[in-house]
Amino acid sequence: MTIDHLDAELVGLLTEEPRMGVLELSRRLGVARGTAQARLDKLQARGVVRGFAPQIDPAALGFAVTAFVTLEIRQRYGHRLVADHLREIPEVLEAHTISGAGDLLCRIVARSNSDLQRVIDQVVGYEGITRASTFIALAERIPFRTLPLVRSAAAPES
């Protein structure tokens, strides 16, 4: 599954200005409105563009501490039940099944270091979780990003 240069430019424009309308997209891309709409629809249908929600900064909401937590689980409970538990905790921003040491990797936020302890206690309070290892992020050096990946994935023009 590849994208071309026009798709990459379209995604780039929407990344920089998410509220841009299709008419303005078509103008900036130099294509017909129908072409811009069709390309956007195709990218959404293929799951390349997953949404247009605002990007939220947890620190601006008072959640200044970010931590990455590796969880070991009791295998008989399985990942789905543990994920269901984690989904109930608002401070758990994401969770991924991983290989290597641990079974799940979570990104969580908290208001302070002492609040982080409260969140971790809530996470490990589920009997299907046997151990947690926590790494507190000191500073964000590269925020979550996908645009460089989109640009590198674009098929070169012939």
Image: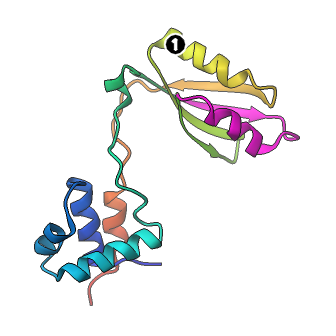
Res 102 seen here: no
Query: How was this image coloured?
Result: rainbow
Q: Quadrant of residue 74?
A: top right
Q: Quadrant of residue 17?
A: bottom left
Position in image of residue 6 (x %, y %)? 25, 77
Q: Residue at (38%, 45%) from the top-left corner?
A: 144
Q: Quadrant of residue 134?
A: top right
Position in image of residue 56 (x %, y %)? 35, 37
Q: Secondary structure at mark 1?
A: helix
Write down the region rendered in magenta: 68-90
Position in image of residue 34 (x %, y %)? 24, 82
Nearer-the-camera pick, 58 or 135: 58
Q: Is residue 88 magenta?
A: yes
Amino acid on which the number 1 mark rests in the picture: Asp
Image quarter of the C terminus: bottom left
Disc 1 designates what residue?
Answer: 115
Q: Residue at (25%, 82%) from the top-left corner?
A: 35
Res 20 seen here: yes
